[in-house]
Every structure is written in C-alpha cells, then in structure tokens.
Amino acid sequence: MLKNYLKIAWAVLLRRKFFTFISLFGISFTLMVLMVVTSLFDHVFGPQMPERETDRLLFVNNLREEQGEGYSSSGPPSYYFLDRYVRRMQTPEKVSVHSVFNPVNSYIHNKKLALDIKHTDQQFWEILDFHFLEGNPFGAQEVKNASRVAVINQTTRKNYFGTGPALGQTIEVDQVKYRVIGVVEDVPVLRIQSYADVWVPITLKSQEFKDTGLRGSFFATIKARQAADIPKIKEEYARIIQDVTRLNPKEKKQVHSYPDTILESFARNFLGSGKEDKVGFLYTMLALAAFLFMLLPTINLVNINISRIMERSSEIGVRKAFGASSNTIIGQFVVENVFLTLLGGLLGFLLSAGVLALINDSGIIIYAQLGLNLRVFAWGLLLCLVFGLISGVYPAFKMSRLHAVEALRGGSK
Amino acid sequence: MIRHLFKLIWNRKKSNFLLITEMFFSFMVLFAVISFVLYNYHNYKKPLGINYQNVWQLSFRSNADSMGQSKAIQEQMMQRLKSFPEVEAASLAHNNVPFSFSSWSMGVSYGNKESVQTNNYEVQDAYKDVFQLSVDQGRWFGPQDAAALHASVVINQVLKDRLFGEEEALGKQIKVDDSTSYTVVGVMPHYRADSEFAEEEPALFRRINLEKAKPDQLYASLLIKVKPGTGVVFEEKMVKDLSRIAKDWTIEVTTLEKMRQSKSKLTWVPMVAMGVVCGFLIFNVALGLFGVLWYNINRRYSEIGLRRALGATTRQIRNQFVGEVLVMATFGLLLGLLLAAQFPLLHVFQLSAEIYWQGIGAAALLIFLLAIVCAVYPSWQAAKIHPAVALHEE
C-alpha cells in the first residue's frame, strides 16, 4: 500500500515539474534556514569539544549581590568565594576554578596578535576534553610552583611559530615570557567557560586570591560523578549560598548564584536577570519564533497543495466511487506530502551544509566549526515531519470531503 | 469595473482566503524588516560628530597591589606619551569611549523640569583634539575651568533640546542632585558615539582634573591620536615603555576603527540575515502565488472563452485578472494595515512614526508590485485563449 502511494507520489511529482520545483524550493529553503539555526544552537549549547560530557558538567559564571533599595550588582564570582566554598563541595567528582578570559597583546615580527588569556588550575584539564595536538597540559606541580608555562591553541601556534617547532619555545604575552608545553585544537569563542588562545597556571594571578569580596573575575566548572547527581549538586550549592548569605548579614541582603548548564546559564543571565531559571521561557520563545517563520511557507505550501490536489479530483472520485473512506484518502495525501517534504528536507540538508561552510569560511564567529551532526539531523527530520503534516493535512481533509459524483465531474466550483 | 472585481473576489472569499492570508503575512514581514532597515539607515546617514581616524584606545587593568599609586602612574604615562613625536593628542577617559560596549548614564535637570537621563563622559581637555570635536555654541572646557565653583560641562544639542528647549543654554546651571550642579559652557552639534547605527542620545562631558583626583583614582582608558601611517612597530615600543612605568598592569591597545567595525557588525549581521530570510520568504510566496494564479486561470478556461466570444478584447481579459489579484492584495493589505498602523499610533519600540509610515508605504508598494509581477504572465496566457477552442472544449 505504502509502496503504491509512494509510486503515485513520484509520478505526480514528475508530471508538473514547475509545481514540484515551487514546492521543493519552499520546503528545502525553509528547512535549510531552520537547520542552520539548529546547528548554531547546537554549536552554542550542545555538547562539543572540549565540553563533551555536558550532562555531567555544571558551570558557575555569575554571582549577584542584592542590597536594599533595589541596588544590585552582578558579575563573575571571586577566587575567594570559589576556592573557599565551591571547591570544597562534597557531591561533585571534581571542581575546577579558572579566570575569565582576558584580552592581551603579543607582538611578533612587527605584527600584533590580539590574544585571550585564561588562568586555570590542573583540574580544568582533567574535567574538560581538550584535544591535544602536541605536548601535554600543565599539572599540579606547575600550578603549585606558579611556573610560567602555557598551553596555546592551534591558530596561535601557527601565527606565532609558523611551521617551526612550538613545544619548549617561549611565547611572550603581555610582556611576560611563557614556555609552551602543549598545543590544542581551537575552542569556539562562544564557549566562554573554556575558550582562550593561551592557558596558563592560575597561581600566576595569585595577587587576586587575597580579595575577600564575593565578586571577582573567576569561573568554576563542576563535574558530577554521574548525570543523576546533578540535582544533588544544585541542592548542595543552594545550601552554600544560604550559608554565605547568612555569614554576611551586615550589608548584603541577598546573594544569588547557581551552577548551571550552558543553556540554563544563558537563559538565566539574559532573560531571568541572573535569578530565575528561564529555560522553559527560552524554549517557548524559540518555538514561537520557529512557528512564525514556518507560517508563511506553510500557508504557501497549503495553497499549492490545494491546487495540485484539485487536479486529481477525478482520481479521488474514482477511489471514492469504489468505496475508499475519507480517512484512507487523507492518509494517502498526507503520506504523499510527507514524502515530498522529506525529499525537500534532503535538499535542505545539502543546502545547509553549503551555507554552514560559508559561515565557517567567513569568520563571522571566531573559531567556529559549524557542522551537521546526528543531533542536528534528528532535529531536521522532526522539523520535516511537522512541516509535512501541517501543510498536508488541511488540503487532504478538504479533498476527502468531496462527493464522489462531483469529484468525478471535475471538482467543486 | 472595480466594484465588480471586489464582488467577484468577495464571492469566492473562501477559496481566496488562503491567498489573502499569505498577502497579509508577507506584508507584515516586509513591514517589520523594512522598518528595521530604514531605522538603521536613517541613523547611519546622520553625522557622528567625531573623527575616529588614527585614534587608538589603551585600556588598563591594574592589580590590587598598586591601586594606591594609580593616579601617579597615569600622570607619568601621560608625560611619556606626550614625549612621543607620533602622538598628536592624548586624553584619559573612562571605559565609555566611542564604539565601546560600556555606558554610564545619570539624570540631570534644569529648573523645575523633570530630570533627563544622559550619557556621562569624563574626559580631559585634549579629548576635543583627539576626536576633532566641534563646539558651535560657547566653548570647550580648558584649564581656566579648574577653579570654577560649579564644574563646567559641555553638552550636545540633543541634551540641550531636552533640557532647555528653545532657551539659551550657555551659562545656565543644571542640577544632578541637591549638592551638585554644573555650568554649561558649550554645546556641540552632534556626538553620536555608541554605534554608527544608533540614535543620537544626550551626552554630557565633564572635565577631568588630574591634580584634584584621589591617589587611587584610575581612569580605565587612554585615547591617543597618532600621526597617519603610525603602525604596530610604534605600538610595540609604546606598550613596552608604558609597561615599564605601570609594572604588572595589563595594557591593551586597539584602534577605534576596529571597535567601530565590531560594533557595526552587531547591527549589520542580523540585518543581512533578516534581509536574506525575508527575501527568501517573499520569493517563495511569489512562486506560490504565481503557481496558484496560473492554475486558477486554467480552471476558468470556459469563462474566459465565453467572455471572448461575447466580444471582450485580450486587453480586457488581462486587466480583469491582474485587477482581481490586485483586489486580493488590497484585502490582505487592509488587514495588515489595521495591525501595522498600531505601531506608529501607539509608539511601539520608540521608533519615530515617520519610519513606520515609510515602512508601511514601502511594504505596500512591494506587495502590489509582487502581485502584478506574479499575475502578468498567467493573465497574458489567459488572454491568449481562443474563444472557439475554449467553447469547443466545454
């Protein structure tokens, strides 16, 4: 049965090539845009090198202090807070404390390299899956001794050392010389927790350890033993924050800080003003935007489908005269339409691969390697099905209600 | 004739409903995108009021240990900078330099009027030379203002209009709170330094008096104007020299040109993306419209044949079909206008009404154009129908 439907669908597609082109163009471009957006979304929030095991990772990057009279300030927490409270948490497997990335300059052969530097501890390298092309990360010993060693990324290696050797050489950043001990693959800039061009031991920034305020310029990355531990870690963290609030009763009325996944922290900082969890809201907004965007192409496709199905009214008439129920006919047209959208989706995939390559080449997003993977593919498939069903059901429903006699005569006027 | 067309469409409103909805949504999309583009374009055309060519920004991050000597260190830095022949002018400032991502605002008021939020800049006398600012009423501040009872400030025309209206501003005092007032000594015609695509906002400049500053006062930015053609070789030398003065500070150098580019990227990347998506949507709609019209006209073969047999010219047939499409577009537009007109009437998003009306006009024009382009070929085909053939088929 299904095979017959597909055969008919194929024959219909070939019959009116111009209409087929219009349908396929609309479907493939709509899905292309959606897939590029999905890929961007995945690039920012999905599991990706070096944050591969996202279901076990939590990030702390914001702390908000609220005092009376509506005065509040927020920003990254201090080393003091993270070292004293977060590092001593019981539930996580490992906790890493590292600085935010800071822009610095480096000069080589009368050329300027604007680099971003990040100060990290050794756990940083254990928690995150950096892909080392050469050498190794620095360990506990180097961090303890505050050695001037650095891990650099691929692009910096190329710009600074060219094709010559890099390991063991010195790189001068912000008037300080570091010995290069490792080279890693580029990390996309949107991964603010792990991104940098140069990573050096955190102890080189020890003058900032003394500041006992809660706000500073440090992040923490927390790794759970297993994904199921995440809620427990969040609970423990909430208890810590309560303690901190209690210990500073004088001026600070309220302290807010949360360990979040990448998506949660984005939603919280941009939509929930650093306090509320707004993931649901973010998803609703995204779904609404996708719906609005798909609305016009869908109406367009419905319009075309109606015209195309009208052409086949005599076919429907014959089938009805031989006893086919309305549901059978709706089923047939929906299958045909889903087939068409899947075909369009396939084209859309090819197109989006091209567009993503263009975005990567253009360098609009630094170190971005946008690509299509299984997750994006699955989302694309889902979008195709939704699109196909929405645009197919109404015309099929309309046609199925035709009376056999009228349909045989050539459709309703 | 036109009434007749309206009647025809109205009678088939059910089957034309989808086409009308499509026109409606296309109009709304076009209206939104065109208004956004127009807004940015209007802003882009206005003067910036600054010349950012060959201006560099040095930004500092000090560390806690040397906090107490910040002022002394920066004084030394200024001395050193002035000794470089490549540097034409230099001024300290806070982080809110042109094209930066930070801003600092405060409320000021004049007389008994409501207070006005204004951007607040604290700069040195040489800031005027760095950006070649022009002051058309009064003067820029200078050393003679050091002893003034109420600090001298220079404001831009936008702030002058909001505070004083038609009144003369020079010499007047504006109030921040009960204990602080400023004297206006100059008005500059334009200062629009947030982004090339941003609207001009009120601006107020105060004078940095380094002698009176506290010892731990740190100005996070230093702006210098260099001689044309000065490059990275000088930059490296300068940073090395300054690092010797400010040990353990991080000094970052960037050009205002680069900052302008990254700031304007924030506007034009979404604008291009929106434009491309909108263009695709409209093209998609056009194709669909074309297909549906073509199909509908084919279905009305016998009607056309009959009209032709009764003496209608090809021209009349063509006009009828183009007319029908335009009537449909009008229905869609009327619906859209009902919604779009709320934007200028209710001042949604703070855009000026003029931009919204221009957007509505342009979107309507494009929709009509789209409808005509899509209708011309199918109606030309319809007009070609030979009456004898059409009637014979019937």
Image (cartoon, coloured by chain):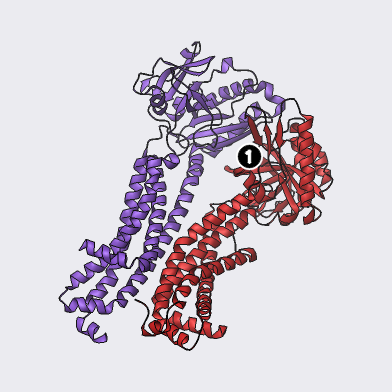
Name the outermost residue toward the bottom.
A322
Query: Which chain is the one coloured red?
Result: A
Relative vertical location of residue A392 with respect to residue B201 in this rendering, above or below: below
Image side of residue B135 versus residue B304, left or right: right
* Colour of the chain lettered B: purple
Q: Nearer the viewer, residue A256 or A198?
A: A256
- Can you see residue B53? yes
Q: Residue at x 32, y 50 (%)?
A: B361
Residue B237 occupies quadrant:
top right
Residue B126 visible (yes or no)? no
Residue at image point 38% right, 49% down: B340
Against A252, residue B214 (above or below) is above
The kind of residue tagged 1 is Val
Q: Of all residues shown, which one is farthest toward the left?
A: B311
Q: Position of residue B265 (x, y in %)?
A: 49, 46
Depth check: give the residue in front, A372 or A5: A5
Disc 1 is placed on an element classified as: strand
- Which quarter of the rendering shows the C terminus of chain B? bottom left
Residue at x 42% of width, y 66% of height: A300
Q: Position of residue A287 (x, y in %)?
A: 56, 56
Residue B140 picture location, percent across and down: 42, 20
Dot 1: chain letter: A
For mark 1, does the 10 Å Cα neighbourhood hold few (<14), some (14 to 19), or many (20 or more) residues? some
Query: What residue is pinned by disc 1?
Result: A104
Residue A171, image quadrant: top right
User: Is B127 rendered above or below residue B299?
Assistant: above
Q: Nearer the viewer, residue A150 or B280?
A: B280
